[in-house]
Image (spheres, rainbow, N blue to C red):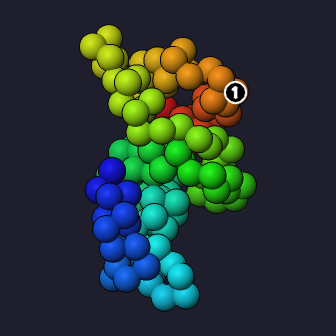
């Protein structure tokens, strides 16, 4: 959420960002380095001890950019912040619980398989 909000404030004028060892996202040419950090987050990067945190998941659920390549093939779009927040129910204790609740509440948004596949690429 931090990179998403920083992009809303700074956009293309933001400085280069580093979120994972070996991944730097530069500004210039209309680039949004805070969004690029989220889009380029690699949950398989073994050099990152925090790769288990699905930092790009929220952006992948919302954005209309359907990446079809490494590191995450995102075929999900259109979720709103309100929908994602509403899925955080008292019965949600894990990301697997969250995925189930998000699907139950928003089946019209996308297919179950697309959301399930996205979560599995983040290892959840």
Q: Residue at 46% x, 73% y: name it.
A: 32
| Residue wearing tag 1 | 111
Instruction: Quadrant for residue 90, please give it.
Output: top left
Residue 19 can be seen in this image: no
Is 106 placed above or below 121 here? above
How many labels sit on residues?
Answer: 1
In the rendered view, does 66 fall on the left or right side of 43? Answer: right
- Depth check: give the residue in front, 31 or 51: 31
Residue 81 at x, y percent in the picture: 41, 39
Q: Left or right of 119: which side holds 52? A: left
Residue 93: where, in percent of width, then height?
A: 31, 19
Is the residue 50 above or below the residue 95 in the image?
A: below
Q: Residue drawn 42% across and 18% down? A: 97
Which residue is painted at 32% across and 17% down in the image?
A: 89
- Judged from the image, the secondary structure of the residue bearing numbered disc 1 is loop
Note whether 88 is above or below 14 in the view shown: above
Report x, y in % for residue 65: 64, 56
In the rendered image, is residue 27 in sight?
yes
Other-residue count near label 1 (Cα within 10 Å), few / some / many at <14 / 14–19 / ≥20: few
Residue drawn at the location 32% of the way across and 58% of the way down: 5
In the rendering, at what x and y percent does residue 88 appear?
34, 23
Residue extending farthest to the bottom is 28
Picture quadrant where residue 68 is located: bottom right
């Amino acid at each position: 959420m931090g990179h998403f909000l920083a992009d809303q404030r700074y956009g293309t004028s933001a400085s280069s960002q580093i979120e994972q060892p070996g991944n730097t996202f530069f500004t210039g040419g209309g680039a949004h380095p805070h969004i690029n950090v989220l889009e380029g987050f690699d949950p398989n990067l073994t050099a990152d001890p925090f790769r288990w945190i699905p930092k790009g998941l929220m952006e992948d659920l919302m954005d209309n950019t359907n990446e079809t390549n490494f590191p995450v093939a995102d075929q999900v779009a259109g979720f709103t912040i309100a929908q994602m927040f509403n899925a955080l129910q008292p019965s949600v204790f894990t990301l697997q619980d969250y995925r189930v609740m998000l699907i139950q509440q928003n089946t019209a948004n996308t297919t179950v398989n697309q959301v399930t596949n996205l979560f599995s690429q983040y290892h959840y």
